[in-house]
Structure formats: C-alpha cells, structure tokens
Image (tube, rainbow, N blue to C red):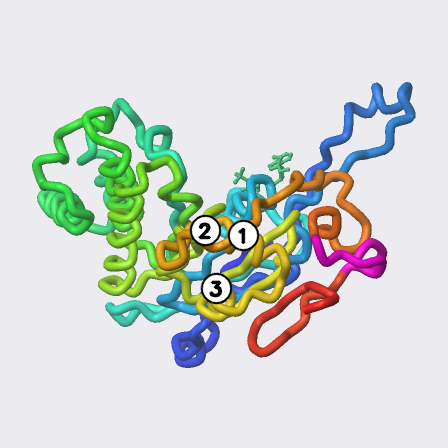
Amino acid sequence: MLEQVSTLAPAKAAGDDIILDVAAACCRFDVSAPALSRLFSHEPRRILRAVESVSFTVRRGTTFSIVGESGCGKSTLARMVVGLQRPTEGRLSFRDIRRADGTIGPPRVQMIFQDPYASLNPRWRVGDIIAEPIRELKLRSGEAAVQQRVGDLLEVVGLSRTDASRYPHAFSGGQRQRISIARALATEADFLVCDEPTSALDVSVQAQILNLMVRLQKEFGLTYLFISHNLSVVRHMSDELAIMYLGRFVEAGPAEQVFTRPQHPYTRLLLDTIPDVERPNRERRPMSGEVPSPINPPAGCTFNPRCAQAADRCRVERPELRQLGGVSVSCHFA
Ligand SMILES: Nc1ncnc2c1ncn2[C@@H]1O[C@H](COP(=O)(O)OP(=O)(O)OP(=O)(O)O)[C@@H](O)[C@H]1O
C-alpha cells in the first residue's frame, strides 16, 4: 500500500537521497464476467495483470522515466504512485524530505495529465484554478497574497499575470499544459508524476513544454516521474529510464546507458523507431506484432512472440531482472 514513512529521525531522513521507494508493486484487476453468468458458462475468473512486481527508487531532484507501448501498465503505475490506485501487492513509500524552509515531511505529490483540455475546469477562470490549492492548503494568508502568488506562478510558467482572468478555452494546448503545471506548483509540490504530458501537443510545442519542465526542475529542485510511450521525448530529460513491457520492467538503469547500450531486444526495437537526424538513411526495423493480452500473457519471456532472438528457453522460462554493468535487464541472452 501507499504509505508515508514517518519522520522518526529527521537528520537521517533529510540526508537520504531517495524520495520514492517502490518494492514489488503489483496491480491486478479482476475482469471476470459477473459471478452468475460464470456459473452457467463455467468461465474461469479473469485476472488482468496491469503491473507485475515492479521495483525501483527515485532520487530527489532527478527524472525517472518509464517508457512502453500503449497498455503496458504505465498509467496504472503512475496512478499507484499518486495514490489513485491501490497496489494489490507490494509497497510504494515516500521518504520524508527537508525543504528549503527547514521543515521536514513527506513530499507533496501532484500529477500532470496527458490531456490539458480535459484536466482544467472550463467554468473556472485560470486565476481561480491556480488559486484553489493555495487557498485550500492555506499556503498564503490573505487574498492579496494569494493573487500575488497566482501572478508569480503564471509568469514562472511563461504566461502573463493578466491571463488569470481568462477561461481555459481561450488558451492553446501548450498554454493549457503551462496552466496545469502552474496549478501543480501552486501546491508547492516536490514530486510531479507526469503522465504523457506532451503527447497531445504539436511537436514544436512539446519541445517548449519539455524545456519548461527542465528549467523548473533546476529552479525548484523538483523530482519527476515521467511516463511516455515515446523514447525520443524522454531522451534529454531522464536521469533514470525504465522500459516497461506487459506490466514489467524489462530494462532499467541510467538513461544514457540504456540509450547508448540497450541490452534488451525490446529496448533496441523501441530505439529503432526513433528517427536519427545524423543517420537518416539507417535501417529502421519496424515494431512487429501486437502487445499480448495482460489477461493471458505468453509463457516464458512475455516478449518472446515478438522477439527475433527468441529460443526454446524463452518460451518456457521467464527471465528474471538481473544486474548487468549497472543496468537491470530481463533477457536470457543479454
Ligand atoms: N480499472 C481498470 N480495470 C480493468 N483493467 C484496467 C483498468 N485500468 C487499466 N486497465 C488495464 O490495464 C492495462 C494497463 O493499462 P494502462 O492504462 O496502465 O496502460 P498504459 O501503458 O498507460 O497505456 P496507455 O498509454 O494506452 O494509457 C490495460 O490492459 C488496461 O486495459
């Protein structure tokens, strides 16, 4: 379950670099037909394994990115981290941190969603959207201080103070994502879970939002858990990178190492899908086949039906994640 580790020893907690510790987290959904209809059809229970035994830690002030195809369990994992989804097994725990004002406590966690059109209340002015958490959490005393903070936040994310009086529909997708970020910062968040924050935006706007996020991370010491289906999006902002396939991490480690020396065949295929401006004519293998069903995953290595290197062993024995030169990989032949 999601828990906040209490502050028993402030000095120790503040000295610890790890902000999030995820240990063997699983999320399984029971997607069986109703009991009565199963009784007549003799259909067995159907359990969908969205996330299976995922373990990782995130260090404060860094970006941990999780990349994988649609349906591999990224959003479910993100929802577990923010507490919107309970793990069915395993544990997710935030460690206490020391803030700039000297206080020690659990990090404030916020989520930035993919769709900046759906995540902002269309009936509220932007100023009220950003002011709400400031008032709710009593982070400023007096309305003048709240309004001052709203204006400052709008400027921090590259908007203007006068935008506070406008409604979300008057903004472009990129501007709305800036408003979502300002709202997250309004809570004085330390940890942002960003679930595909740029995938609904044009490519040029994507780069602007990513640059903004990198700047804010440096300025405010933010920690990001960044979810994407697109490796090229996370390339320049990740410290750690995990590649997820059918609910499990298949490769994880320092981002640069995973990018430059990928060891899992799935990581290599994902990298092949990225256009390379320096080698535009390089041979690019398309990703073949579909992601199997998480209700009935293949035996052995779950990637084996799509893997060109698969051997008999891969069809019967599931490879464990093992350490290989600083990176964890689950492939019999890595
Ligand atoms: N509440 C739920 N009940 C049943 N199944 C669910 C539920 N939430 C997610 N799933 C299933 O869990 C699996 C993983 O879904 P998830 O949304 O986490 O994947 P994803 O990698 O984020 O995909 P996408 O990028 O398309 O959002 C999918 O098969 C999905 O259908």
| Residue 45 in sight here | yes
The amino acid type found where label 2 is placed reads: Ile
Circle 2 or circle 3, nearest the eye:
2
Residue name at image x 78 percent, y 59 percent: 318
Tag 3's secondary structure? helix
Q: Specify whether 235 is left or right of 307.
A: left
The residue singled out by tag 2 in the image is 274
The amino acid type found where label 3 is placed reads: Phe
| Residue 137 in sight here | no
Q: Are marks 1 and 2 in contact (CB under 8 Å)?
A: yes
Indicate the quadrant containing the N terminus: top left, top right, bottom left or bottom right.
bottom right
Whole-percent x, y for residue 308 in the image: 70, 53
Placement of 158 over or under 271, stated as above or below: above
The residue singled out by tag 1 in the image is 270
Tag 1's secondary structure? helix
Indicate the quadrant containing the C terminus: top left, top right, bottom left or bottom right.
bottom right
Q: Specify whether tag 2 is near ligand 1 (CB below 8 Å).
A: no
Whole-percent x, y for residue 41 in the image: 89, 21
Q: Residues within 10 Å of mark 2 (few under 14, many from 20)?
A: few
Q: Are marks 1 and 3 in contact (CB under 8 Å)?
A: no
Residue 243 is a magenta residue: no
Q: Nearer the viewer, residue 37 or 176?
A: 176
Residue name at image x 44 percent, y 80 percent: 12
Measure how far apart labels 1 and 3 are at the Cα level: 10 Å
Residue 259 - label? 3
Q: Specify whether 203 is left or right of 321.
A: left
Q: Specify whether 132 is left or right of 256.
A: left
Query: What are the residue bounds of the magenta stretch?
Result: 308-318
Measure how far apart labels 1 and 2 are at the Cα level: 7 Å
Q: Residues within 10 Å of mark 3 (few under 14, many from 20)?
A: some
